[in-house]
Image (tube, rainbow, N blue to C red):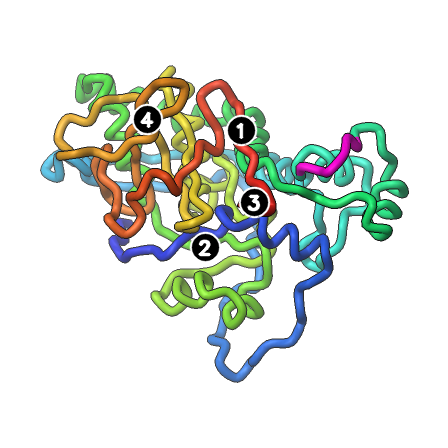
């Protein structure tokens, strides 16, 4: 289903801010319940048993008269594998705002945050004690680290999707540009929703972006680790936000050997894709230079052509490469 409403941002792009306030214990439980709308679902938990199937008919974003149809079917076990693996990489138990009491959680904490000293050999006890004594503190976050973890885990589990795209390619005899456009158009036409790493009800009155999107009619799902869905998880749910889409399309296009990056903006609270592929139609296209190459932007939350970006967030100085084609990720410092 295509949904062309303008989105004000996306959840995962401000995840580092939430992690900092969680780890510093600054989240307040007080909020005005009287102005909070009813939420049908407080969490992203849905029980899935057996195969999952989704069908979609969509138009090509650059050639609206050209239409495609496709059906994907995946196993529930792959969905849970994708979902649970990403959750295992999160250092925090989001439902109670505390660090996970596990060795894996601590290893994720060491990897995901940038610390003021090398803590690779620190025990969990030393991390906590040094943190409480203010000897140890975070300086920033590795913004593309979760996306890299999801890509590496899920890239071999998307054959059901690759198969659908291969059939369309064979039937339509698409050029390499048209093939990328068909794939991107598919994702652009999947329903939008907000996976949120906090509590949607509470943050409705605390976080402007959550309120804006919920007021526009979009669903918000609470306690989603890192605030995005991993590729297989996303296709199983068939709904998601901007960095959810960026991670999926990044994974798919890399499978087909395109040169791609994930672009993120803390300033705009948004995530998009960058592709080293020259636009055919867009006038004065937007791009980000990385490793002396031009990566043209691709908006994924609504039908849009390569190189075209909403004027309200097209200042490329506010965009960073969160994850590049070589799986290197950027670091967002605590103070820009």
Q: Is residue 194 above or below residue 177?
A: below
Label 3's element?
Answer: loop
In front: label 3 or label 2? 2
Whichever of labels 3 and 1 marks the residue nearer the N terminus, that label is 3
Instruction: Verify CB contact (< 8 Å) between mark 2 and mark 1.
Output: no
* Residue occupying the point 13% across, 39% down: 64
In front: label 3 or label 1? 1
Residue 300: quadrant of the picture = top left
Label 1's element?
Answer: loop
Question: On the image, numbered disc 3 is attached to which residue?
Answer: 49
Left or right? Give the position of 166 relative to 175: right
* Residue occupying the point 25% across, 35% down: 286
The x, y position of residue 167, in whole percent, is: 28, 21
Magenta-drawn stretch contains 116: yes
Question: On the image, numbered disc 4 is attached to which residue?
Answer: 295
Label 2's element?
Answer: strand
Left or right? Give the position of 130 relative to 21: right
| Residue at mark 1 to residue at mark 4: CA–CA distance | 15 Å
| Residue at mark 3 to residue at mark 1: CA–CA distance | 35 Å
Instruction: Verify CB contact (< 8 Å) between mark 3 and mark 1.
Output: no
In front: label 2 or label 4? 4
* Residue occupying the point 64% across, 40% down: 84
Whichever of labels 1 and 4 marks the residue nearer the N terminus, that label is 4
Whichever of labels 2 and 4 marks the residue nearer the N terminus, that label is 2
Question: On the image, numbered disc 2 is attached to which residue?
Answer: 194
């Amino acid at each position: 289903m295509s949904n062309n409403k303008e989105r004000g941002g996306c959840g995962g792009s401000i995840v580092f801010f939430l992690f900092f306030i969680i780890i510093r214990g600054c989240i307040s439980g007080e909020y005005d319940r009287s102005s909070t709308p009813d939420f049908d679902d407080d969490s992203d938990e849905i029980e899935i048993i057996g195969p999952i199937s989704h069908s979609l008919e969509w138009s090509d974003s650059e050639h609206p008269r050209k239409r495609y149809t496709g059906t994907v079917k995946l196993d529930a076990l792959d969905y849970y594998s994708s979902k649970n693996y990403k959750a295992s990489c999160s250092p925090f138990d989001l439902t109670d705002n505390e660090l996970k009491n596990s060795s894996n959680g601590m290893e994720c904490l060491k990897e995901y945050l940038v610390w003021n000293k090398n803590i690779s050999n620190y025990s969990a006890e030393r991390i906590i004690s040094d943190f409480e004594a203010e000897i140890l503190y975070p300086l920033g976050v590795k913004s593309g680290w979760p996306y890299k973890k999801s890509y590496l885990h899920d890239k071999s589990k998307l054959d059901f999707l690759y198969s659908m795209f291969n059939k369309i390619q064979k039937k339509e005899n698409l050029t390499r540009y048209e093939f990328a456009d068909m794939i991107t158009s598919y994702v652009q036409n999947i329903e939008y929703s907000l996976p949120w790493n906090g509590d949607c009800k509470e943050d409705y009155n605390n976080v402007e972006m959550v309120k804006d999107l919920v007021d526009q009619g979009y669903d918000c799902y609470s306690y989603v680790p890192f605030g995005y869905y991993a590729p297989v998880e996303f296709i199983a749910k068939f709904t998601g936000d901007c960095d959810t889409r960026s991670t999926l399309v990044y994974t798919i296009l890399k499978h087909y050997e395109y040169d791609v990056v994930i672009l993120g903006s803390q300033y705009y609270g948004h995530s998009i894709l960058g592709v080293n592929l020259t636009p055919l139609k867009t006038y004065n296209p937007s791009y980000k230079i990385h490793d002396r190459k031009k990566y043209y932007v691709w908006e994924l939350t609504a039908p849009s052509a390569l190189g075209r970006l909403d004027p309200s967030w097209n200042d490329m100085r506010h965009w960073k490469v969160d994850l590049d084609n070589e799986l290197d990720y950027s670091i967002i410092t605590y103070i820009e």
